Image (cartoon, rainbow, N blue to C red):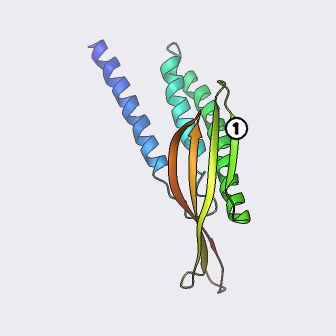
Amino acid sequence: MENVIKILGKKVMIFAILFIFSIVSSGCANSQYGSGAGMPLLGAATGAAVGALLNKRNRFQGAVIGGAIGGAAGYAFGAIQQRAINRAIATNKPVTMRRNTGNGGWQEVQATPEKTYYNPQRHTTCHKVRTKIIENGVVKEDRVKEVCEGEKKTNEY
């Protein structure tokens, strides 16, 4: 019975990790804060899960430490990604930013502006930017993100 509980506990933890990952990664970049906003949460969730699995004596302690480290790493990469997108929009030129990871590898964000358009009904200017996330030479993500800036035309909310 004890082995069944251990196996079931691991399956529940794996399901929880995948569930959190799917929620965070399904986010959409409809605002100037959208593209990197889920990175700290994703990093913290992944770090907490890994920490809990690695620290067999005290899983709670492992989850807390792993979550803190993962959240900080996720924040750092999310900030780099957002900075690359903002700079690509401002200069209307491709931007590449790279950071070294703690394990001797690297992560890179390439942001290439594709299209800018104005929506008169919503009083917004939207920019489509293709972002590529590359880790150690392998493309991990390649998608087009939309960043919109609104104009307030009335004095009501």
Question: How far from the left and from the top, in percent, is residue 152?
Answer: 66, 81
Compared across the picture, whether 103 is left or right of 41 comes to right
Visible in this render: residue 38?
no
- Residue 33 appears at what percent x and percent y? 63, 58
Residue 94 versus residue 62 in the image, above or below? below
Residue at left offset 63%, top offset 37%: 107
Tell how many labels.
1
Q: Which quadrant is the C terminus positioned in?
A: bottom right
Q: Nearer the viewer, residue 10 or 73?
A: 73
Residue at 51 percent across and 25 percent down: it is: 50
Q: Indicate left or right for 53 with 36 as reference.
A: left
Residue named by callout 1: 99
In the image: residue 18, left or right of residue 146: left
Front in this rendered view, residue 46 or 98? 98
Residue 12 visible at all = yes
The kind of residue tagged 1 is: Arg
39, above or below 152, in the image: above
Q: Quadrant of residue 61?
A: top right
Quadrant in the picture for residue 64:
top right
- Residue visible at 64% across and 28% down? 105
Q: Position of residue 127 (x, y in %)?
A: 60, 68
